[in-house]
Amino acid sequence: MNDLRGLAVSSGTAASQDIFERALAALNVYRGDAVAIIEEALAVDPDFVMGHVLRAEVLITMWERSVVPKVQESLDRLQGLHSHSNDRERAHVQAISRWVAGDWDGMRIAFERLLADHPRDLLALQVSHLADFFHGDRDNLRARPERVLPAWSANDPGYGLLLGMHAFGLEECGQYAQAEEAGRHALDLQPDDCWAHHAVAHVMEMQARQAEGIAFMQSREAHWAQSDNGFSFHNWWHTALFYLDQGRNAEALALFDRCIRPEPIGVQLMMLDATALLWRMHLNGGDASTRWNELADTYEQSNEAGFYAFNDMHAMAAYTATGRTRAAAELLKAVQSSAAGQDTNARMTREVGLPIVQAIDAFGKGRFAETVSLLLPVRYKAHAFGGSHAQRDIVHRTLIEAALRGGDQAMARALTQERTAQKAHCAFSWGLRQRAA
Ligand SMILES: [Fe+2]
């Protein structure tokens, strides 16, 4: 049997295959619960290899410790089905097993091998594209779709999704005009591709096109902000950034309450966006203490410290903003112990995660010179722990604020000159430069 893209599958009834396609389509545009959908198939067809693969890989895209036992459960089932699986399915299992072992780099290589052999494997492409994002690997964010695009034709269902991924990679590589063109082309083909929409929003963020950005988000809301869209919180976050940079804090906070953090959910990806927005306001001197307390509580209740360096940075920001010195000290200990490990996160933590966590801790304690000296060497290497340029901007902003508050005028001047050179149309950045002057 083949799937819709012509890839051979070793097992699964026609009904299971239909459910697989439904779950994959849900993942593609982040609508509904792809795990719950595929579990419908697994309930009646427990030996359905690609069903277990999809379940594991969707869980992996959350990139947090809490999902490891569930991914392990799928992996155990898949290892038991090894002799029935085909080579492509085994390559998926290899990628999943690398992730569970903490060898995230190995997982991405396994996917690269798989996609070279099977460039039409849309699940592998999307999951590894997201993995590239979690590594801040802009080259592969752009190149991974490029490697497979020739195996697709514009008439294939899902072709637009590839363009949406390519658009985001182009944006992260600074090729803004091409990124916007690819993103808009993707949206013409598939209007509800919220990842492509998001790529265009990133272009506008990087080019400080705030008014246009707000209009773009609003005009296409029906396509990305549906109530079952699991990615809408992040597109709302981008909308709030446009407002913030225009100095419209009330609008940004209203979006925070209504769309970004309407309830205390312990999903790290959602928590980090909420934290990043409040941290920007915190740096601007704003007070959002009630909101901070809820976030810091949720971080304290989660068991994620030391799992992924990018999440650790945000947890430290929440502890710092709420003055939780005990929680901050415990987090720091967990991060230091991760840095001593051998896995991919250990490398990320050693290279950038640990100094950045320490810098934020020092910032909270008023040791601004220490923040500056910790951040200066790593800020342009910070992609090593993942996220986008827009998300990592809090590292640059924290550095500027530390220089300003610590009275390091020469450094503040230099950094804000750099910022206005790169974002010539950003009123907020000019405001920082004036403060430095
Ligand atoms: Fe984004």
Image: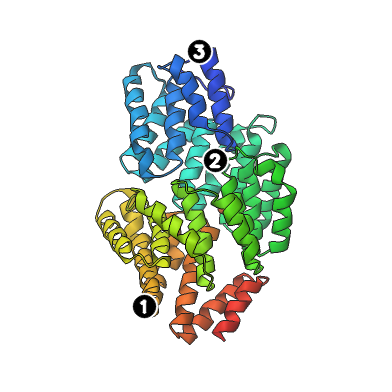
Residue at 33%, 38% (x, y): give it: 100
Which residue in the protein does label 2 denote? Answer: 147
Do the numbered discs 2 and 1 sit on residues whose CB atoms are within 8 Å? no
Q: How packed is label 1: few (under 14 Cα within 10 Å), some, or many (20 or more)?
A: some
Q: Of the residues tagged 2 and 1, which is closer to the observer? A: 1
From the viewer's perspective, is residue 100 above or below residue 324? above
The residue that appears at 46% across and 73% down in the rendered structure is 399
Is 156 situated above or below 365?
A: above
* Earlier residue among tags 3 and 2: 3
Query: How much space separates mark 2 and mark 1, taking CA atoms?
Result: 47 Å
| Residue under pointer 3 | 13
Residue 407 in the image, given as x and y percentages of width and height: 45, 86
**Residue found at x 35% / y 38%:** 68
Neighbours of disc 3 within 10 Å: few (<14), some (14-19), many (20+): few
Q: Relative to residue 30, is residue 414 depicted above or below? A: below
Q: Secondary structure at mark 1?
A: loop
Disc 2 crowd, CA 10 A, few/some/many (<14, 14-19, 20+): some
Mark 2 or mark 1, which has the lower sequence index?
A: 2
Closer mark to the observer between disc 3 and disc 2: 3
Taking the view exactly as shown, the residue that stands out farthest to the front is 290
Q: Position of residue 71 (x, y in %)?
A: 37, 33
Res 171 seen here: no
> Where does the C terminus fall, quadrant-wise?
bottom right
Please, what secondary structure does the residue beneath circle 3 have? loop
Residue beneath disc 1: 367
Between the C-alphas of marks 3 and 1, the distance is 62 Å
